[in-house]
């Protein structure tokens, strides 16, 4: 059974002519994005009325937001959840998986200890490999949960993926500081 769309003015998948689902054709998304941007670019409305120019700017912003959302695997998953009545943006729900939380504490400690390790570059590569493995495993899990319409479990997996993504970002920033 398909749920109603919740307070969304436009369905991003429909906008880009993509089937509703986690797996998307990235090339088709990018191609349709360029087409839409050309069609509503504010320069095309330079001689139009003030209202038409403002609408073009608004449409351009909506298209940009839709593109960024669908381009990002986490953003796309959050959007699919939102379409099915689960809002993750700005939520305060915590992860209730104690094993995952303990693992995150260990990963955070490993990240903080990197600069002081005997071989920081190797330790960073090892941590990056572990995070990549965790992300791949969780992405596979997320895909299955979304396809199975297990929305609450998919939401938990998205929350976990956000933890991994944040650690990957922090690791990248740390590695940039080491770069000459």
Image (cartoon, rainbow, N blue to C red):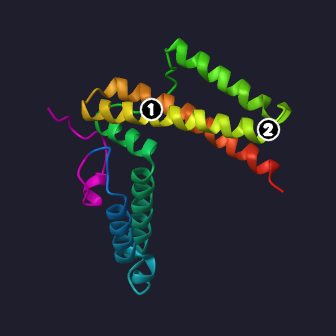
Task: Tell me if I can see residue 127 in this picture.
Answer: yes
Main SS type for the magenta part? loop
Q: Residues within 10 Å of mark 1 (few under 14, many from 20)?
A: few
Task: Tell me if I can see residue 10 in this picture.
Answer: no
Question: Of callouts 2 and 1, which one flags the residue occurring earlier in the amino acid sequence?
Answer: 2
Specify the quadrant of the image occupied by residue 53. Answer: bottom left
Q: Which mark is residue 137?
A: 1
Who's the residue at 28% across and 53% down the image? 13
Foreground residue, 116 or 1?
Answer: 116
Q: Which residue is mark 2?
A: 120
What element does badge 1 sit on? Answer: helix
Could you tell whether 155 is left or right of 121 in the image? left
In the picture shown, does residue 30 fall above or below 22? below
Q: Residues within 10 Å of mark 2 (few under 14, many from 20)?
A: some
Q: Which mark is residue 167?
A: none
Who's the residue at 49% across and 15% down the image? 97
Q: Where, quadrant-wise, is the N terminus in this rendering?
A: top left
Percent across and percent down for residue 158 are 44, 32
Q: Where, quadrant-wise, is the C terminus in this rendering?
A: bottom right
Residue interval drawn in magenta: 1-20
Who's the residue at 32% across and 44% down the image? 22
In the picture shown, does residue 163 fall above or below 101? below
């Amino acid at each position: 059974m398909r749920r109603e769309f919740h307070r969304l003015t436009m369905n991003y998948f429909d906008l880009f002519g993509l089937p509703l689902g986690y797996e998307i054709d990235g090339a088709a998304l990018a191609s349709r994005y360029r087409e839409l941007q050309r069609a509503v670019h504010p320069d095309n409305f330079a001689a139009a009325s003030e209202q038409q120019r403002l609408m073009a700017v608004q449409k351009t912003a909506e298209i940009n937001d839709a593109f960024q959302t669908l381009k990002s695997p986490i953003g796309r998953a959050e959007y699919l959840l939102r379409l099915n009545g689960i809002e993750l943006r700005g939520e305060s729900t915590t992860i209730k998986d104690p094993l995952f939380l303990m693992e995150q504490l260990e990963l955070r400690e490993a990240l903080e200890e990197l600069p002081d390790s005997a071989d920081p570059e190797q330790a960073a590569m090892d941590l990056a490999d572990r995070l990549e493995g965790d992300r791949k495993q969780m992405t596979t899990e997320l895909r299955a949960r979304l396809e199975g319409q297990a929305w609450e479990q998919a939401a938990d997996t998205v929350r976990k993926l956000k933890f991994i993504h944040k650690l990957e970002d922090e690791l990248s920033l740390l590695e940039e500081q080491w770069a000459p």
